[in-house]
């Protein structure tokens, strides 16, 4: 039955990871619609969800498939399709709504995705929740500081 629906056990794993990503994106979209704080508060709340111990097994699967796709494993390569852009688009739209240009919003969304993924990988490797939470808070503080500084004219 597995082979019929997913082609292989690995195909099942890819679909589980994709479904998890879609669900996380849906949750973020709901948060954008319902959240009454600022974007930094929303990012903090979403980080707490992503870095929860309950999601750790799915995060491990995500990084395993990501690595296998990068190594060219045929069953995992489809997982890489949209693994970045599917997050950049919705996040950059929200950032444009906060006053950033399209280019600035896309760059900030990509940076945020890289920071979150890097810290999740750190958390999985070290189990240092306090350390990664502190690092994420430093990242959020840097964003606030950067946005409050006057922009250089070109």
Image: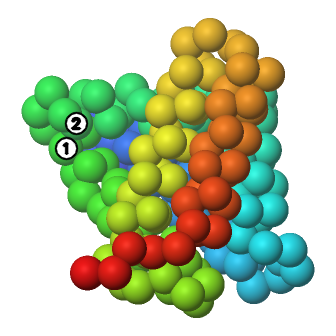
Residue 83, x across and y down, in percent: 35, 55
Query: Toward the viewer: 20 or 7?
Result: 20
Q: How dense is the environment of label 1, judged by Cα within 10 Å: few (below 14), some, or many (20 and up)?
A: some
Residue 60, x across and y down, in percent: 52, 26
Say if mark 2 contacts mark 1, CB within 8 Å: yes
User: Up-down: is 117 above or below 153?
Assistant: above
Residue positioned 67% across, 39% down in the render: 138
Q: Which residue is mark 1?
A: 77
User: Up-down: is 29 above or below 121?
Assistant: below
Q: How dense is the environment of label 2, judged by Cα within 10 Å: few (below 14), some, or many (20 and up)?
A: some
Sequence-wise, the earlier of marks 2 and 1 is 2
Q: Which residue is mark 2?
A: 69
User: For the residues marked 2 and 1, what is the alpha-carbon distance in whole angstroms?
Assistant: 4 Å
Disc 2 element: helix
Residue positioned 51% across, 26% down in the render: 121
Q: Is residue 78 left or right of residue 119?
A: left
Residue projecting furthest to the right: 36
């Amino acid at each position: 039955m597995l082979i019929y629906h997913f082609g292989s056990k690995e195909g099942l794993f890819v679909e589980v990871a994709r479904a998890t990503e879609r669900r996380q994106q849906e949750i973020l979209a709901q948060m954008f619609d319902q959240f009454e704080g600022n974007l930094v508060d929303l990012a903090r709340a979403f980080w707490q969800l992503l870095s929860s111990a309950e999601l750790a097994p799915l995060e491990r699967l995500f990084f395993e498939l990501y690595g296998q796709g990068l190594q060219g494993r045929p069953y995992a390569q489809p997982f890489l399709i949209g693994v970045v852009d599917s997050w950049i688009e919705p996040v950059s739209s929200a950032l444009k709504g906060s006053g950033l240009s399209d280019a600035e919003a896309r760059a900030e969304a990509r940076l945020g995705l890289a920071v979150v993924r890097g810290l999740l990988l750190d958390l999985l490797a070290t189990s240092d929740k306090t350390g990664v939470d502190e690092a994420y808070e430093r990242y959020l503080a840097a964003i606030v500081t950067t946005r409050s500084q006057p922009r250089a004219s070109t």
